[in-house]
């Protein structure tokens, strides 16, 4: 007879659940933050031209839209690769924090011109 344990039953029994899907979303957020900072600095130095999607708000609309697109693509790719994986949560946390900090630093006015 096949076992039909629910998610709640497996948690109570101490069976480890794969955390890959959650870590994919988490790390993708860091990648999106880093991408936004990178887009800001590349745009400030004139290496890429990002159009304003809504003129009254200015160029920030195009930059954030590109950052969101990178985040969604990263999330889709990482989710497909990691959904059934059991990853090191601490390592994923450190990677994400580093990416977010780097993205924020890159978007600071002192670096962006």
Image (cartoon, grey):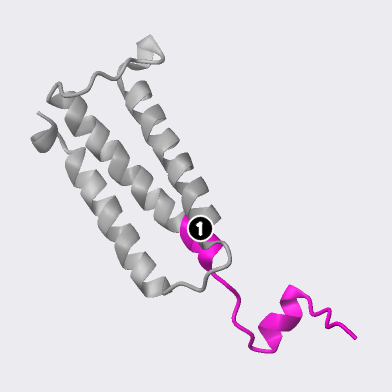
Q: For mark 1, what is the residue? A: 81
Q: Is residue 2 left or right of residue 57?
A: right
In the figure, 8 relative to 93: above or below? Answer: below
The answer to if 15 sits in the magenta stretch is yes
Residue located farthest toward the top when viewing the structure as drawn: 55
Quadrant assignment for the N terminus:
bottom right
Q: Residue at x 33, y 44 (%)?
A: 33
Region in magenta: 1-24
Q: Residue at x 52, y 65 (%)?
A: 20
Q: Residue at x 53, y 54 (%)?
A: 79
Nearer-the-camera pick, 48 or 14: 48
Q: Residue at x 18, y 30 (%)?
A: 42
Nearer-the-camera pick, 111 or 49: 49
Nearer-the-camera pick, 49 or 64: 49
In the figure, 79 relative to 41: above or below? Answer: below
Q: Where is residue 64? Give x, y as percent.
A: 37, 30
Q: How many marks?
A: 1
**Picture quadrant of residue 50:** top left
In the figure, 86 relative to 75: above or below? Answer: below
Q: Is residue 104 left or right of residue 2?
A: left
Few, some or many C-alpha atoms within 10 Å of disc 1 (few <14, some 14-19, many ≥20)?
A: few
Residue located farthest toward the right when viewing the structure as drawn: 1
Residue located farthest toward the bottom when viewing the structure as drawn: 13
Quadrant assignment for the C terminus:
top left
In the figure, 69 relative to 51: above or below? Answer: below
**Picture quadrant of residue 14:** bottom right
The answer to if 20 sits in the magenta stretch is yes
Q: Where is residue 99? Give x, y as percent.
A: 28, 53
Q: Secondary structure at mark 1?
A: helix
């Amino acid at each position: 007879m096949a076992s039909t344990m629910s998610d709640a039953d497996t948690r109570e029994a101490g069976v480890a659940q794969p955390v890959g899907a959650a870590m994919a979303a988490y790390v993708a957020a860091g990648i999106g933050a880093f991408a936004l900072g990178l887009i800001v600095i590349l745009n400030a130095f004139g290496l890429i031209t990002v159009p304003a999607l809504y003129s009254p708000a200015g160029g920030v609309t195009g930059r954030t839209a590109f950052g969101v697109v990178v985040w969604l693509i990263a999330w889709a790719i990482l989710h497909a690769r990691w959904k059934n994986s059991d990853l090191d949560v601490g390592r994923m946390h450190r990677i994400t924090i580093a990416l977010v900090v780097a993205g924020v630093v890159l978007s600071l006015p002192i670096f962006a011109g």
